[in-house]
Amino acid sequence: MVDLYFPANTVMVTGYGFDMLYAGPREAVLHAVFRQNIGCTHLIVGRDHAGVGSYYGGFDAQTIFDEDVPEGALALDIYRADHTAFSKKLDRVVMMRDAPDHSPEDFVLLSGTKVREMLGQGIAPPPEFSRPEVAEILMAYYQELDGHSAA
């Protein structure tokens, strides 16, 4: 991805060796502090960030930054991600909240679970969700996990 799609010297791919604790909102704050301390300027906090099942509310890990983290306590910005989908109208992936003029039929929407199932069965997700060269790599990976031979 870095070599093919981003301008030179604008992206760094590194490891982040920290196992998920599934501690929901408090873990989101921990992720913010850790990433801030290694020099990150932003943290994307998605739906059900560090959650497990339905133990925490879907957006609790976002609201903790508004309700319990004092303003100015962090030196990085929190980007609150919403449900994402491919907009047929705009021909790109959008946060659904940013497309109030759309109806459900205007979106191509797949869950992460559905995408993983498709990949495991050797079915590439629609091109709106994954570049074909990325889908090939992911299909081989998920088929290997499932004990199928990669095509």
Image: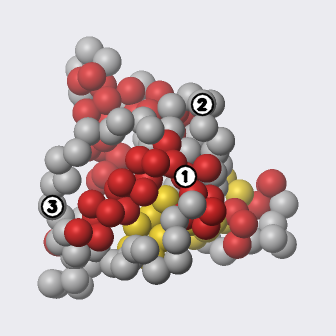
Q: Are marks 3 and 1 in contact (CB under 8 Å)?
A: no
Q: Amino acid at mark 2?
A: Tyr
Quarter of the image where one finds residue 93: bottom right
Q: Is residue 38 left or right of residue 62?
A: left
Relative vertical location of residue 122 with respect to residue 93 in this rendering, above or below = above
Classify mark 3: helix, strand or loop. Answer: loop
Q: Quadrant of the N terminus?
A: bottom left
In terms of depth relative to the viewer, which is nearer, 41 or 63?
Answer: 63
Mark nearer the N terminus (2 vs 3): 3
Residue 68, how many percent across, how many down? 57, 60
Residue 14 has which mark?
3
Q: Is residue 46 left or right of residue 119?
A: right
In terms of depth relative to the viewer, which is nearer, 32 or 42?
Answer: 32
Q: Quadrant of the C terminus?
A: top left
Residue 76, how many percent across, how many down? 38, 76
Relative vertical location of residue 29 with respect to residue 10 in this rendering, above or below = above
Label 3 – label 1 distance at C-alpha: 24 Å
User: Which residue lies at the image location 63% right of the left edge and 62% below the top edge?
Assistant: 67
On the question of residue 5 being in view, the answer is no
User: Which residue lies at the image location 22% right of the left edge and 83% below the top edge?
Assistant: 10
Classify mark 1: helix, strand or loop. Answer: helix
Question: Residue under circle 2?
Answer: 55
Q: Amino acid at mark 1?
A: Ala
Label 2 – label 3 distance at C-alpha: 31 Å
Mark nearer the N terminus (3 vs 1): 3
User: Which residue lies at the image location 51% right of the left edge and 31% below the top edge?
Assistant: 52
Q: Amino acid at mark 3?
A: Thr
Question: Residue under circle 1?
Answer: 61
In terms of depth relative to the viewer, which is nearer, 108 or 66?
Answer: 66
